[in-house]
Image (cartoon, rainbow, N blue to C red):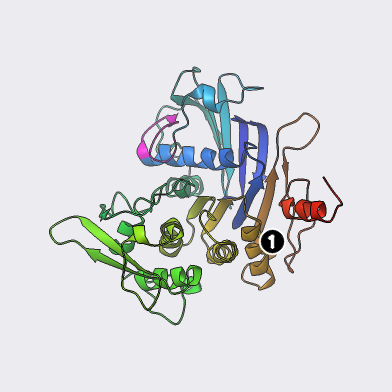
Amino acid sequence: MINQLSLTNFKCFELLNLPLGSLTLLSGTNASGKSSVLHSLALLHQTMQDKEWSNRVHLNGSAVYLGTATDVIDHVSGRDGFGIGLKGDNSSCQWSFSGERSDMSLQVTRIEATGESADQPELLRYLVPLDVGEAVTALAEAIRDITYITAEREGPREFYPLEDPHTHNRVGPRGENAVSVLERGRDTRVMSGLRINAVPPTLLHQVGARLDEFFPGCAIDVQSVPNANIVTLGVRTSEATGFLRPIHCGFGITQVLPIVVAALSLPRGNVMLIENPEVHLHPAGQALMGRFLAEVAQTGVQVIVETHSDHLLNGIRRAVKANLIESQEVMIHFFRARTSDAPQVLSPTVDSSGNIDAWPQGFFDQFDKDMDYFAGWGE
């Protein structure tokens, strides 16, 4: 598990040391740095995945397009580089990157890995030296295998390509491979801690059962097209109807599908980054998503989620109170605009009853402000 992320002169952060839990929720105002946290991890991930043997970090690739060095180096205190650091259970790694402002990849200028350091390293695999040790190699491989799901997920399609499972074994940043992963792994068994006992334990049945929880009456059907590497997805929204093309069903179904497929197909020890999982969900569905992600985290898949949804937060709090996840496994971070006289990130804690110890100004308090206004108590 990744226990801490450190950023130096990366985007809006001069220095950030962010603790991470089994389930980490990133909240806050717009343009306050939440996405930057996910981008830093996705940046390492895509470099390791796309450029196995490279001593440069690549800003544009399969997961994110971050532009040039100018776009990712802190404009206030940064000069020609930035740093990213990770701490795992038994290892740590700190990278320093530098380059020209117009560069779209930056040189690894220094690595510090669990007590060892190297300047200007030339031979790296997955951004770490070959002789760095098993613990650091395992940490790098965990980053390489990250599942990153963006807020801009693909909508309904007439058909979906079947991808090579050896090269596309994740749902993809936009969920573009979700149906392929579902079809290829339809008969694999889901981890026992995530199974719904009333249905068979295999992936296709379990994904369908989870969608039925989010969208009562929902069922799915995946069919291969003969003599073509494509499949179709049928969606039924009521037992009284047949299976329809996804375009004729609620948009939320295809937005939730990649998250559910990823969560139920990943092995323990993997990491999921999810932007705005609440997109196109009814408030009850948003709360259920919070509960579902808590269940996923408790089974050993680390989840880091960015959200603007108080319903999702409350779903996590309810999961804590219901003993679906331990309160100490949940980290909550509230980001706000950078100033010289206040911390950029505040970290409220949740207790075993689901109570939060502090509610900073702007931390999911808009409902209370609106009610105060209607009561004549505020502006």
- Residue 202 in the figure: left or right of residue 102: left
Q: Nearer the viewer, residue 121 or 293?
A: 293
State which region is magenta: 50-64
**Rendered location of residue 54, percent (x, y):** 39, 31
Q: Quadrant of residue 73?
A: top right
Query: Count of labels shown?
Result: 1
Q: Magenta span has 58?
A: yes
- Residue 166 in the figure: left or right of residue 9: left
Q: Magenta span has 103?
A: no
Q: Quadrant of residue 62?
A: top left
How many other residues sit within 10 Å of disc 1, few (<14), some (14-19) or many (≥20)? some
Residue found farthest to the left = 227
Q: Residue at x 39, y 31 (%)?
A: 123
The disc labelled 1 sits on which kind of residue?
A: Gln
**Rendered location of residue 290, percent (x, y):** 59, 62
- Residue 245 in the figure: left or right of residue 127: left
Give the residue number, with chain letter if any, for mark 1.
328
- State which quarter of the image contains the N terminus: bottom right
**Rendered location of residue 326, percent (x, y):** 66, 66
